[in-house]
Amino acid sequence: MSDQGMFGAKGSGDTSGYGRLVRTAASTGSSERPYGGYFDEVADDLERAYPDFADAIERVVVDRGELTLHVKRERLVEVSKILRDKLLFEMCLGVNGVHYPSDANRELHAVYPLLSMTHNRRIRLEVSVPDSDPHIPSLVEVWAGNNWNERETFDMFGIIFDGHPGLTRILMPDDWRGHPQRKDYPLGGIPVEYKGATVPPPNERRSYR
Amino acid sequence: MTTYTDPYASSRETTEGTVFSVTGGDWDSLVTEIGATKEERVVVNMGPQHPSTHGVLRLVLELEGETVTELRCGIGYLHTGIEKNAEYRSWTQGVTFVTRMDYLAPLFNETAYCLGVEKLLGITNDVPERASVIRVMMMEFNRISSHMVALGTGALELGALSPMIFCFREREKVLDVFELIAGLRMNMAYVRPGGVAQDLPAGALPKLRETVKELRRDFKDNDKLLIGNTIWMKRTEGIGFLDLAGCTTLGITGPVLRSTGMPWDLRKLQPYCGYEDYNFDVVTANTSDVYGRFLIRMNELEQSLRIIEQCIDKLEKLEGAPVMVADKKIAWPSQLALGGDGMGNSLDHIREIMGTSMESLIHHFKLVTEGFRVPAGQVYSAVESPRGEMGVHLISDGGTKPYRVHFREPSFNNLQATAAMCEGSLIADIIGAVASIDPVMGGVDR
């Protein structure tokens, strides 16, 4: 993103002082027990069904009434199978990539929202991998519906899902270069002239952070 | 030396075999030419420009005679980068983008997104009741207009023309409702984080009651045309079969899942916007086929009308109540007004900020250009859209813009079932199966 914004403003371009009230990212530590609601039960059940729980689950985060299990990528398939078969999370609602360039050695995250129709529960799995080694085992053998979602995440972030039956681009053309949803991929756009004034493309406009 | 191939020639030889191109011309000569080949196996490219594939969907079919042995979908022709674009706009502006994804169900996109933003802000319980009731009412009207397109085009694709005319007649009435309330017929960006953009115009409720009455009367025309119709039954019964196990492993939701007999409806099971306060039934079928899905959509229309009537009753009691959260750091200060060309700032507000109050002007300017800050974190929120679970995964880094917006689009996931539904069936039955999934390519490709 360019430093120089619309009307020649640099940095935040904010002159009111208002914009300095940026809150930094929430702490990334684990949540403490009790997690509340059915989350304790899910964690207990998983611990019972999966003896390697402590090794496989890096962190358990409860935030805004949602449970996130941060899973080591080597254990992802095992944990998923247990969650599906023993804890009855029958449905995986896809996978979403997130790119955190400042999170060293954990730049790329894959987030899997899971749904248990039997218990009417939702949890979320999160896997993080370094940009230099963007490999995550595929979950297509566990939930076949993840096929297209993993292709989309590969297409948009360049995360390679090992064991996927046909990991090709899905939304972008086959010969496209780069992975558009990554933070280092520019939005692009051209300046637009409107009534004599030139409006810069959105990623070059004055930005408030 | 390069080999020159004439793109308009009827056929050319490739390493994969003979490729026939259909670019207009005499159909009979093409059929004769294909008939001359020894092979029974033909690979046919259906779409992306095909009247029966529900938009720019490309199906690659491998055929043995008329039987489909393999089917693959090609998507991405309508990819517009909405998720990427939203990262460069304020949280409120995001509504304008997401409403354009699944263009037949804009209010569901908006509501799913706004519920997510509200959850991130921690103001879910502060959204005024009147705003939630209006959201529910608009969503149910939207469900009707969306199902009308699904049923109308589905019937049209299977060769029944009259239902389409009736369906679009009814849809028109619903779009008139949207125009009355939001000023726009589609992509209205009406639901905003914290509430809705503006209150109902004066005298809207009697008009809505009238519309509900008309819709209930006119839905009968379609019932008479299709339910129990022999030709329709033959084209839809037992077609596009997908059972419960198939649905769960493929992540299928919505009418396709309910056609297996599973009463899975987020409005009942994980209520949002106060759906727990309404009386309605979850419609299911137990045939797991195209006919079952068709019946579900037909019967959901009546359930939507029931909910709308309860909304109108509630709105009469909540006359004059706020439709936006009270927090002035989130709610836009301007009361929007419906002008001749859609929604705009009310003249009273402009008079105030330009003429009397400098502080109001600054506040307005900061909130509109910069937007509000959303505490860092991630949430997932889902609503039951006409096509299934419309989920949104929102991540904030504490700034005025989303860090990442991802939509779990029901059309995208449901479309994966095409191969499971169609392989082994006749080529003509693909049309019915795809129509029963009701994918909207704007939503699939985003």
Image (cartoon, grey):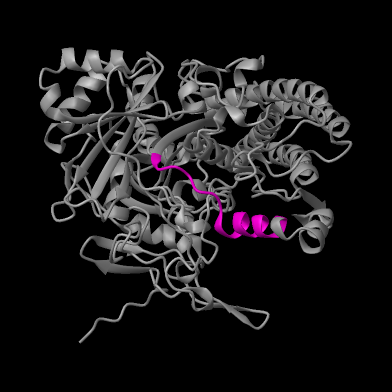
Q: Closer to the camera, B316 or B106?
A: B316
From the viewer's perspective, tell me whether residue B272 is left or right of residue A53.
right
- Magenta range is B360-377
Whether residue B48 is visible to the viewer of this picture, yes or no, is: no
| Quarter assignment of residue B295 | top right
From the top left corner, tell me how far across and down residue A204 is, in percent: 46, 71
Above or below: residue B102 compared with residue A203: above
Question: Does the magenta run of residues contain B369?
Answer: yes
Above or below: residue B282 compared with residue B153: above
From the viewer's perspective, tell me whether residue B366 is left or right of residue A96.
right
Q: Closer to the camera, A101 or A52?
A: A101
The quarter of the picture where the N terminus of chain A appears is bottom left
Question: Does the magenta run of residues contain B427?
Answer: no
The secondary structure making up most of the magenta span is: helix
Q: Residue at x 11, y 17 (%)?
A: A51
From the top left corner, tell me how far across and down residue B74 is, in percent: 38, 51
From the top left corner, tell me how far across and down residue B230 is, in percent: 62, 24
Q: Closer to the camera, B404 or B72?
A: B404
Q: Residue at x 58, y 18 (%)?
A: B283
The quarter of the picture where the C terminus of chain A appears is bottom left
